[in-house]
Image: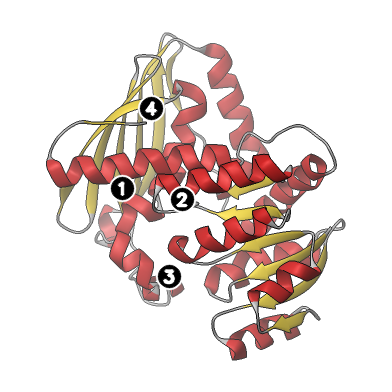
């Protein structure tokens, strides 16, 4: 599958570009970025071609991978889907549910395969845990703490303008939500409260009746950082196992699924429909925090 990469930031270097270059079923064709010099440098590293226009790269490939801020990614993904290009997107798909839904509609109209890169969700250990939890059933609650900092020395994501504006809700929030949805089911309503140091606290009611509690931040003191998750119910208290941070490995698994789906295989669990569902939840959470009211998730 001929792939074009859009984006030249740290995540493009850490996951997308090496993942595309390493995959046996991918031809890494070219790179487009908002900074032409950075696009040329990244393309040169992988013997790909730098592109000066988004349209030219979309025209030359069968699929696009996007490593750009959500408000830049969403309209570009919509253009690519309408051109019948398969999609490998980053989370969150968009900041607005209406735009995410447009991408979903375009993929359906054009028969486009899609996948959203919720990094650790593609690691087999975590997938097995979630499948076992779904089979066990009887869960009454979940708790996810995804709390850390991107502003420590040497962290390249601390310079990200969109992360500074949107904080942990939109940066690590998608990972937390993507963890509980397959086990507890669709979210029907959410309440939220924001505290200093970007601490965002969510309560989400699921269609199953269970409630999940999520704590998010990308700006806590290092001593307060933690990444923990549990499910509790009839089967006891299950702790989500620690999953190694191997983004290129996870990216390879995502590509495996996308290639099969694009060739006529099954619709993927973590496709843009799932990504749009996550966007709807986070948008509702943002509104709930702003108004101090419980907000329905449409």
The reply to whether the C-beta atoms of the residues labelled 1 and 4 are less than 8 Å apart is no
Disc 1 element: strand
Distance Cα–Cα, label 2 vs label 1: 24 Å
Mark closer to the chain start, 1 or 4 = 4
> Is the residue under label 2 in contact with that under label 3 (CB below 8 Å)?
no
Question: For the residue carrying disc 2, how many other residues have a C-alpha within 10 Å: few (<14), some (14-19), or many (20+)?
Answer: some
- Judging by the rendered image, the residue that carries numbered circle 4 is 187
Q: CA distance from mark 1 to mark 3?
A: 16 Å
For disc 1, the marked residue is: 216
User: Who is closer to the viewer here, 143 or 55?
Assistant: 55
Give the percent coordinates (x, y) of residue 256. 78, 46
Q: Which circle's residue, 3 or 2, is located before the other in the chain?
A: 2
Residue bearing the label numbered 3:
157
Viewer can see residue 175: yes
Is residue 113 in view from this perspective?
Answer: no
Return the disc, 1 or 3, that comes first in the chain's sequence.
3
Which of the two residues, 66 or 24, is positioned nearer the viewer here? 66
- Image x and y of residue 290, in percent: 16, 47
| Label 3 residue SS | helix
Q: Quadrant of the C terminus?
A: top left
Q: Residue furthest bottom?
A: 37
Alpha carbons under labels 3 and 2: distance apart: 25 Å
Residue 163 position, x and y percent, is 36, 64
Which of the two discs, 2 and 1, sits closer to the camera?
2
As helix, strand or loop, the secondary structure at mark 4 comes to strand
Nearer to us: label 3 or label 2:
2
Counting residues from the start of the chain, the first of labels 2 and 1 encountered is: 2
> For this view, does 295 lie left or right of residue 250?
left
Question: Of helix, strand and loop, which one carries label 2?
Answer: helix
Q: Which residue is mark 2?
A: 99
């Amino acid at each position: 599958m001929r792939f074009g990469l859009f984006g030249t930031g740290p995540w493009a270097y850490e996951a997308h570009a090496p993942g595309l270059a390493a995959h046996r079923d991918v031809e890494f064709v070219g790179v487009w970025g908002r900074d032409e010099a950075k696009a040329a440098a990244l393309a040169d590293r992988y013997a790909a071609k730098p592109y000066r226009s988004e349209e030219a790269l979309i025209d030359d490939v069968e699929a696009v991978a996007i490593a750009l801020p959500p408000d830049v990614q969403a309209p570009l993904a919509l253009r690519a889907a309408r051109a019948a290009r398969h999609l490998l997107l980053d989370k969150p798909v968009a900041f607005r549910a209406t735009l995410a839904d447009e991408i979903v509609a375009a993929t359906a109209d054009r028969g486009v395969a899609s996948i959203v890169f919720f990094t650790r969700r593609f690691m087999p250990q975590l997938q097995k845990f979630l499948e076992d939890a779904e089979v066990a059933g009887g869960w009454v609650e979940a708790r996810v703490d995804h709390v850390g900092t991107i502003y420590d020395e040497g962290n390249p994501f601390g310079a990200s303008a969109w992360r500074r504006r949107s904080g942990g809700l939109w940066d690590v929030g998608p990972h937390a939500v993507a963890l509980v949805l397959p086990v507890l089911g669709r979210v029907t309503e959410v309440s939220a409260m924001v505290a200093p140091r970007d601490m965002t606290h969510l309560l989400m009611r699921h269609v199953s009746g269970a409630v999940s509690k999520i704590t998010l931040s990308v700006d806590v003191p290092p001593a307060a950082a933690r990444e923990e998750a549990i499910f509790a119910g009839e089967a006891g208290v299950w702790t989500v196992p620690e999953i190694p941070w191997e983004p290129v490995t996870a990216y390879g698994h995502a590509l495996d699924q996308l290639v099969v789906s694009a060739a006529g295989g099954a619709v993927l669990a973590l496709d843009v429909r799932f990504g749009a569902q996550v966007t709807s939840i986070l948008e509702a959470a943002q509104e709930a925090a702003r108004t101090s009211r419980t907000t329905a998730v449409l």
